Structures are given as structure tokens and as C-alpha cells.
Image (spheres, rainbow, N blue to C red):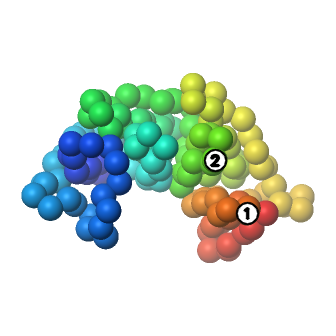
Amino acid sequence: MASMMLSVMTACAQMPSNDIVAEGETPVRVADSYSFTEGPAVDARGDVYFTDQPNNKIYRWDCESGEITLFTDQSGRSNGMYFDVQGNLIACADMDNQLWSFDIEGHSKILITDYRGKLMNGPNDVWISRDTLKMLVHGVAWSH
């Protein structure tokens, strides 16, 4: 069973160094009731969103309280995720090989279903550069 590991820190701000764990801190297991965690993405506040991919769920870890809550139980079996500049959670929903967007309330909409009339084969990772959406679809990099 996969475990979600997060380091407990006193503030939600990013660490100024390249260290994964802040000096003097120790990683602790905050939960272990997931089948397979994927796609961690951090919002502007510092909350961490992650998927339990085979169970079709996205969870949110609150950086201030340390609480984990269900964000959605209809994630399209999302994998890789990334926040856009508007605060929407963009997710590779590989159940139907699509790219989805979730608003702050967890409501989804489909952004992309195909490329030039062909279905995507398992969208896996997504990131958004300054002006371009980029996605990894089973070994093929894709930009739009």
C-alpha cells in the first residue's frame, strides 16, 4: 500500500534552499489509506493536492491544519496535475484519455479530448509554462 509522505513544517511558505526537508525537521507519515498516490500539485496557498488514482479520487492536504480532505471522488482517474495561473487544477484524466480542469469547488470540465482527431493515449503528466500547456502522453511530449 502506498503511503503519502509529507514533511511537517511550521509555515506553508516554500523553503528557500534546495533541501527536500527543512533542517531540524523529520518527515512523518500523515496517512496510509490509499492504493496508489500520484500527481502532487501545490496551490498558491501551499495546500497539496494528490490523487488516489485507481480509486478515482483527488485529496487536499491543508498546509495550516495538516488535515486531509476529499476534493473530488470523480477525478477521471487523474494522474499528473498542475495549477494554472487562475487557480484551476489541471489534471490528466486517463480514464477516458482526456485533460480536465477543476475549479476551487472541485467541479470539473473537459479541456481536451483528442489531438487532431485522435484520442490521446494515457495522458500522464502536465505542466504549464509561461505561455504554453505541455503534457506527457505515454512517452510523447505535447505542447499547445
Res. 138 visible in picture = yes
- Residue farthest to the right? 117
Question: Which comes before the other along the chain, label 2 or label 1?
Answer: 2
Circle 1 residues within 10 Å: few <14, some 14–19, many ≥20: few
Res. 93 visible in picture = no
Residue at 45%, 48% (x, y): give it.
Answer: 42
Which type of secondary structure does the marked residue at label 2 adopt?
Answer: loop
Residue at 32%, 62% (x, y): give it.
Answer: 16
Which type of secondary structure does the marked residue at label 1 adopt?
Answer: loop
- For residue 105, side relative to residue 17 (left or right): right
Q: Is residue 112 above or below residue 75?
A: below
Residue at 38%, 28% (x, y): give it.
Answer: 69
Q: Quadrant of the C terminus?
A: bottom right
Query: Which label sits on residue 38?
Result: none
Image coords of residue 22 (percent x, y):
20, 59
Query: Which label sits on residue 85?
Result: 2
Image coords of residue 17 (percent x, y):
29, 67
- For residue 33, side relative to residue 124 (left or right): left
- Residue farthest to the front? 16
* Amino acid type of the residue tagged 1 in the rendering: Thr
- CA gap, disc 2 and disc 1: 12 Å
Image coords of residue 111 (percent x, y):
76, 45
- For residue 74, side relative to residue 38 (left or right): right
Depth-wise, is mark 2 or mark 1 nearer the camera? 2
Based on the displayed image, in which of its 4 quarters is residue 133 positioned? bottom right
Image coords of residue 5 (percent x, y):
25, 51
Residue at 17%, 53% (x, y): give it.
Answer: 27
Considering depth in this image, is 14 or 107 the residue closer to the camera? Answer: 14
Based on the displayed image, in which of its 4 quarters is residue 110 positioned? top right
Query: Which label sits on residue 132?
Result: 1
* Amino acid type of the residue tagged 2 in the rendering: Val
